[in-house]
Amino acid sequence: MWQIEIIMKISRIIIIILLAAIALPVIWYGGRYLFDPAGLSFEKGAICTTNETDNELVFSVESIPGSKMIALLAKGENICAPSSTSNPTGEIKVGEDEDHLACVIQVDKPEDVIFLSRYFGEGKCDWGKTTR
């Protein structure tokens, strides 16, 4: 009977050590590498965009092949959708909410960084681009 108690105490100690091994890096780094998609990214390329308007807008960025990222961006903020290939193509959509992403631009050159320069409303916007 005493052997079972010893095994139970040892298993509790092991669990506490494992939890500490997981919690300490999260506390130390603020979770930026464990929970941030960019922190664990193995992408070779990405489709990126920046909001250069004065409006807070919802951006959807999709890289093909790759992933789709959606975020609310304020002026000057950016978002990238990583891809497993070095030359992804993709699509960027913008709108006032996630259900109304009416401004759309196709991205054929991943070296181009697309930015939204003006947003007029449903389906009306001006895009610009720079090269990385």
Image (cartoon, rainbow, N blue to C red):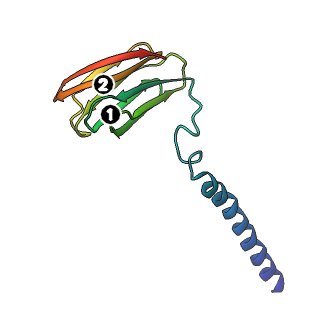
Q: Position of residue 9 (x, y in %)?
A: 76, 78
* Callout 2–callout 1 Cβ contact below 8 Å: yes
- Residue 119, compared with residue 127, is above or below; it is below
From the viewer's perspective, is 49 left or right of 23?
left
Q: Position of residue 106 (x, y in %)?
A: 33, 17
Which is nearer the N-term, disc 2 or disc 1? 1
Q: Amino acid at mark 1?
A: Phe
From the viewer's perspective, is 111 left or right of 6?
left
Local SS, label 1: strand
C-alpha distance separating marks 2 and 1? 10 Å
Q: Residue at x 52, y 40 (%)?
A: 37
Q: Which mark is residue 116?
A: 2
Foreground mark, 2 or 1, reads 2
In the rendered image, the residue lying farthest to the bottom is 1
Q: Residue at x 26, y 39 (%)?
A: 98
Q: Position of residue 62 (x, y in %)?
A: 39, 28
Q: Which residue is mark 1?
A: 59
From the viewer's perspective, is 40 left or right of 111?
right
